[in-house]
Image: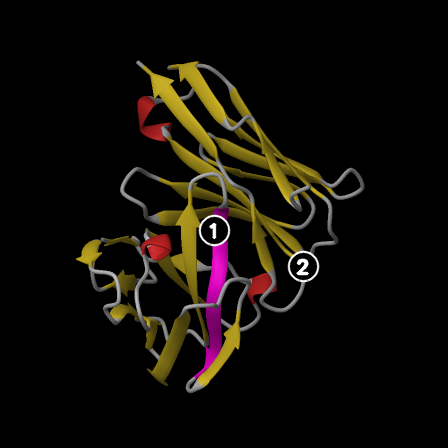
Amino acid sequence: KNEVEQSPQNLTAQEGEFITINCSYSVGISALHWLQQHPGGGIVSLFMLSSGKKKHGRLIATINIQEKHSSLHITASHPRDSAVYICAVSGGYQKVTFGIGTKLQVIP
Amino acid sequence: DVKVTQSSRYLVKRTGEKVFLECVQDMDHENMFWYRQDPGLGLRLIYFSYDVKMKEKGDIPEGYSVSREKKERFSLILESASTNQTSMYLCASSSDDYSNQPQHFGDGTRLSIL
C-alpha cells in the first residue's frame, strides 16, 4: 500500500464544474503539499498546510489530520486548470513522499 | 521569484555514456534535490544535498552520483547510462528544513537512453 494515495487518478470535467481531488496518507506528517504539473513538466507548489483550510483564488485545500485526509477543490473550473495535481507529505527532515498524481482535463 | 533552471529540456544519449544533468538555483537555498518521475510511480528521490559538498542518498540512488561544488549548482551524473534510466528528471531546491518550506522545481529534463 502506498503511503500517499490520490483519487481519482484521472478526471475529466466540463468547464465551470466544481472539482474535488482527494488525498489519503498513512504516515505521520508535519505538512501536506498540493502541487500542479502542467504538460511539459514544470511543477508549481499550490499549497502547504498542516491544519484547516487554505484558499487561493478558485482553489481551496483542506486537511483533516485525524482522518489523515486532504482535499483539493477547484471552483468554476477552466480549461487552463488542466494539469496533473500531486499530493505530497513531509514527515521529517527532508523526508517527502509523493502521490502518483491526478490527471485533470477540463473541456470547454 | 525563485528560479530553478535545468540545463536541458530534452536529452538523448546512448547506453554506456556518462551523462551530466545540471541544475542551478538563484535563491541561495541550502537544500537541493534530484527526482525522477515515471508513469504510475510518482516522484522518487534519487539524491539530495543540504550544503556544499554534502550529499545524502534518497530512495533510488543506484546508478547515479551527484556533485555540489557550489551552493547554487547541483549536478546529477549517470555513470554509465542504461535504458532503464530513461525518465523525466526534476531538480528542486528549498531553504532550511523542507518541512516548513515548499520545494521549488525546475521544468524537468526528459532523458532518453537508446
Say which of A13 and B84 sits in front: B84
Residue at image point 69% right, 41% down: A1
Pointer 2 and pointer 1: residues touching (CB < 8 Å)? Answer: no
Q: Position of residue A62 (x, y in %)?
A: 64, 37
Q: Is residue B82 visible?
A: yes
Chain to which the residue tagged by mark 1 belongs: B
Residue A16 figure quarter: top left
Residue at image point 59% right, 53% down: A97
Residue wearing tag 1: B43
User: Closer to the observer: label 2 or label 1?
Assistant: 1
In the rendered image of this protein, does residue A54 appear above or below residue B49? Answer: above
Could you say whether the residue bearing mark 2 is in a helix, strand or loop? loop
Q: Position of residue B1 (x, y in %)?
A: 33, 60
Chain to which the residue tagged by mark 2 belongs: A
Which amino acid does the dot numbered 1 rest on? Leu
In the rendered image of this protein, does residue B29 appear above or below residue B39? Answer: below
Magenta region: which residues?
Answer: B42-51
Looking at the image, residue B43 sits to the left or right of residue A64; the answer is left
Which amino acid does the dot numbered 2 rest on? Gly
Looking at the image, residue B66 sits to the left or right of residue A86; the answer is left
Looking at the image, residue A103 sits to the left or right of residue B16; the answer is right
Residue wearing tag 2: A91
Could you say whether the residue bearing mark 1 is in a helix, strand or loop? strand
Q: What is the count of numbered marks?
A: 2
Image disc number at residue B107: none
Residue A78 figure quarter: top left
Instruction: Tell me if residue B43 is in the magenta stretch.
Output: yes
Residue at image point 49% right, 38% down: A101
